[in-house]
């Protein structure tokens, strides 16, 4: 680990008045969260993601899609935040304003203590009415419902439409409010910490460019391997977030 880069990152963060942390699958992978394809094990090896994660698939076979996401949710529920998640949460005690924008749906940032998290792709632990009959989203507390679990998803208690996971599927747009807020805060950031993302999935991939273009933000890219953000980053630190971020926190505290 390059200690000079760690110190530079610490110095930059300590001066930040509007920090945005953008995280991707790499952060969750360090906790052991299975990727979409990693979870295609056992009975699920015969399926393609397009058969399991589209609104069309849910309409055609709601039980299949429901059971798949219950399988994924069970896998994710066994996973805990790692030191990278906790380090990001600790930044809240050291800086005046920090927002986490994540592409992950596992809720690990919130579990680690981060209080301002924009989950662009939703949260696998939450459920909603598939018709959003009471507004977008119409969240449903599934644990309070009684239904035949073996039969697939429960009906919405308000309108009777199927209840579904509160996640963004292929062919769906991101939640408007979440995306608008993420774009606004990215445009206002003075430092953006990009962690564990290859920068391949839009629109999240454009947010570092937005931060740079609109406010001249200082970009810190943390990833074991160089990615599409690295060429525009002001500082690239190679390594897993669970090692790099705690080192940065220690350097900040020593100052």
Image (spheres, rainbow, N blue to C red):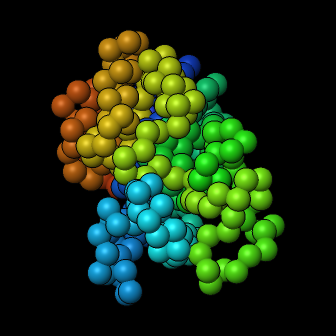
Residue that extends furthest to the bottom in the rendered view of this protein:
42
Q: Is residue 87 above or below residue 231?
A: below
In the image, residue 106 lies at what x, y percent?
53, 59
Q: Is residue 55 visible?
A: yes
| Quadrant in which residue 221 is drawn | top left
In the image, residue 124 lies at what x, y percent?
56, 59
Q: In this rendered view, identify the residue nearer to me: 252 or 46.
A: 46
User: What residue appears at the point 36 percent right and 34 percent down from the top-left corner?
Assistant: 203
User: What residue appears at the point 52 percent right and 53 percent down from the top-left corner?
Assistant: 167
In the image, residue 44 lies at what x, y percent?
37, 80
In the image, residue 15 lies at what x, y percent?
51, 21
Q: Is residue 248 above or below residue 233?
A: below
User: What residue appears at the point 36 percent right and 55 percent down from the top-left corner?
Assistant: 26
Q: Is residue 69 visible?
A: no
Q: Is residue 120 left or right of residue 232?
A: right
Q: How many marks?
A: 0
Q: Is residue 152 left or right of residue 55?
A: right
Q: In this rendered view, identify the residue nearer to me: 158 or 116.
A: 158
Q: In this rendered view, identify the residue nearer to me: 62 or 75.
A: 62
């Amino acid at each position: 680990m390059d200690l000079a880069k760690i110190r530079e990152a610490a110095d930059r963060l300590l001066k930040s008045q509007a920090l945005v942390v953008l995280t991707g699958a790499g952060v969750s992978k360090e906790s052991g969260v299975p990727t979409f394809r990693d979870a295609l094990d056992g009975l699920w090896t015969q399926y393609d993601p397009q058969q399991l994660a589209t609104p069309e698939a849910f309409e055609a076979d709601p039980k299949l899609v429901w059971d798949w996401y219950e399988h994924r949710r069970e896998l994710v529920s066994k996973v805990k935040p790692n030191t990278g998640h906790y380090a990001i949460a600790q930044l809240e005690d050291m800086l005046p304003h920090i927002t986490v924008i994540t592409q992950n749906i596992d809720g690990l940032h919130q579990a680690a203590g981060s209080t301002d998290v924009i989950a662009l792709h939703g949260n696998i632990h939450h459920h909603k009415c598939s018709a959003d009959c009471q507004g977008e989203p119409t969240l449903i507390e599934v644990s309070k419902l009684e239904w035949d679990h073996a039969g697939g998803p429960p009906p919405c208690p308000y309108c009777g439409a199927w209840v579904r996971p509160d996640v963004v599927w292929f062919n769906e747009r991101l939640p408007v409010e979440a995306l608008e807020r993420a774009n606004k805060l990215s445009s206002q950031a003075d430092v953006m910490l990009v962690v564990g993302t290859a920068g391949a999935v839009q629109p999240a991939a454009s947010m570092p460019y937005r931060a740079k273009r609109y406010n001249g933000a200082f970009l810190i890219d943390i990833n074991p391997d160089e990615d599409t953000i690295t060429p525009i980053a002001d500082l690239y630190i190679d390594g897993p977030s669970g090692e790099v971020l705690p080192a940065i926190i220690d350097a900040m505290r020593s100052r």
